[in-house]
Image (cartoon, grey):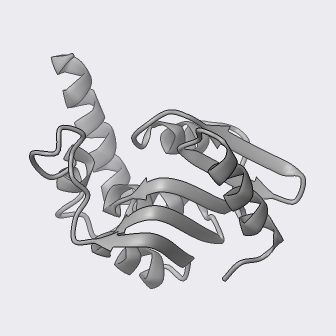
Amino acid sequence: MKNGDLERAMELFTSGDYTYILCKGEVMLTSTERGVKPLLQWLDGENSVKGFSAVDKVVGRAAAFLYVLLEVKEIYAGVMSEGAADVLSKYGICSGYGVLVKEIINRKGNGICPMEQAVKGADTPEQALEAVRKKIKELSNYT
């Protein structure tokens, strides 16, 4: 699965305090933010990440659907949910992981991640994106 882009991203990932790294050729995009926010920012930005290789700390189904929309070519996650692996496989995105889990757990460790919950009924990346945006809006009203 490893090619030059993914290898470079993984090297930088292990040497830094990043949550996300996307790499293609000489272009490297990084983030230290948690959650799906950086993926939404890349999705909404004017610069495409189509064909990039991605390394991510945690990938659940919500993030997997967003990576499909971003059109990354491959992804490695430290932790990946079974649902995320299924989504990535369905859409032809090569994936690997350190640990495969049934579901992504929330930050408090007492339940399912709200983003995982939000996309439970989603069958397409577009439905997932709508559900994620709606959940983020709901959560931001509570903070």
Percent x, y of residue 2: 71, 78
47 relative to 36 in the view: left or right: right
Viewer-proximal residue among 103 and 125: 103
**Residue 61 location, quadrant:** bottom left
Relative to 97, residue 45 above or below:
above
- Relative depth, front residue between 110 and 45: 110
Residue plotted at (29% across, 33% down): 136
Image point 72% across, 43% down: which residue?
29
In x, y percent, where is residue 22? Answer: 68, 53
Give the total of numbered labels: 0
In the displayed structure, does residue 49 sit left or right of residue 18? right
Residue found 57% across the figure and 47% down from its top: 20
In-front residue for pair 57/121: 57
Q: In this view, does 7 lie above or below 36?
A: below
Is 28 located above or below residue 46 in the figure?
A: below
Q: Can residue 68 be seen in this view?
A: no
Residue 76 position within the rendered picture, expressed as x and y whole percent measured from the top left: 56, 67
**Percent coordinates x, y for residue 96 in the rendering:** 52, 76
Question: As drawn, is 3 to the left or to the right of 92?
Answer: right
Name the side, left or right, on which 20 lies relative to 134: right
Where the C terminus falls, by quadrant? top left
Q: Which residue lies furthest to the right in this view?
A: 26
The reply to whether residue 59 is visible in this rendering is: yes
Q: Residue furthest front?
A: 15
Where the N terminus falls, by quadrant?
bottom right
